[in-house]
Image: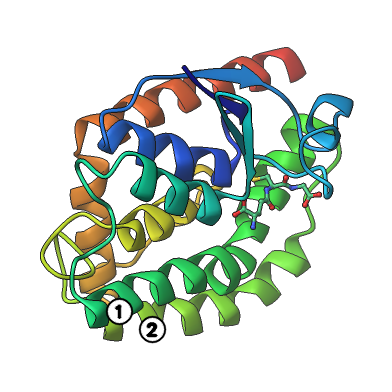
Amino acid sequence: MLVLYGINLSTFTRKVRLALAEKGLDYRLEVAAMGSPKVRALHPLGKIPVLEDDGVVIPDSSVIIAYLERSRPARPLYPDGTRDLARALWLEEYADTRLREATLPYFSERVVKPVFQGKPGDAELLARAEAGRDECFDYLDRELPGAPFAVAGMLSVADIAIGAQLVTYQQGGGEIDAARWPRLAASAGSLARRPAWAAMRAEEEAALAAARARRG
Ligand SMILES: N[C@@H](CCC(=O)N[C@@H](CS)C(=O)NCC(=O)O)C(=O)O
């Protein structure tokens, strides 16, 4: 069986879990925190997620999804045509890097610091993050065709990568103003209604609620 090392509330673990769920693949989530000895033994940078498939160790969410596309091609997340594939991979890369950087402060300052580290978030840092978030959402809103899917009229790795980051942003209380970013808001809304996404969201909300309760 596939084993995925990671934790819930980790954006990149979520990205792979959504890919596995949308491909209908069974796996076992082996809870392993970033930087832990278990993860360091599998990933030279100590990052999550890492997938293990019958002794083959695959670090990095994008590499894992590429591997799954080759090893388990049913229910593809890569579009067929080369142009569409390039576009989906570009949007995945953009989501994993720029969208990540632009939206992470909402989660770090409003969840990680107060809930997991017991210290106040930095309101000034959050205020400064707004311009980057706006620039990023403007770009995606221009690029996306609107609901339901980003590329080729099919659920692809682009939707999964963008959606995984937006969940983290929303868990940090971030909103997508539908008046300003209608296509992005519609895409996020239609992904959130998919069964795999709703189930993951519910699991993570419960984990967050438990962490908040522990903090008191
Ligand atoms: N490019 C990597 C990024 C993975 C990543 O940054 N994961 C986060 C958790 S969501 C992590 O392990 N952070 C710890 C660190 O950066 O040291 C991927 O796509 O898997």
Does label 2 point to a residue whose CB lies under 8 Å from ligand 1? no
Could you classify mark 2 by the number of other residues whose Cα lies within 10 Å: few (under 14), some (14-19), or many (20 or more)?
some
Does label 1 point to a residue whose CB lies under 8 Å from ligand 1? no
Q: Amino acid at mark 2?
A: Asp
- Label 2 sits on residue: 138
Task: Name the residue rendered at 24%, 48% in the picture.
Answer: 191
Q: Is residue 158 above or below residue 202?
A: below
Where is residue 104 shown, x and y percent of the image? 63, 58
Residue 7 seen in the current view: no
Q: Name the quarter where the C terminus is drawn.
A: top right
Q: Amino acid at mark 1?
A: Asp
Where is residue 143 shown, x and y percent of the image? 28, 83
Could you classify mark 1 by the number of other residues whose Cα lies within 10 Å: few (under 14), some (14-19), or many (20 or more)?
some
Q: Nearer the viewer, residue 37 or 176?
A: 37
Task: Name the residue rendered at 75%, 29% in the picture.
Answer: 33
Q: Are marks 1 and 2 in contact (CB under 8 Å)?
A: yes
Q: Is residue 145 left or right of residue 7?
A: left
Where is residue 129 shown, x and y percent of the image? 65, 72
Residue at disc 2, secondary structure:
helix
- The image quadrant that residue 71 belongs to is top left
Numbered badge on residue 32 = none
- Label 1 sits on residue: 141
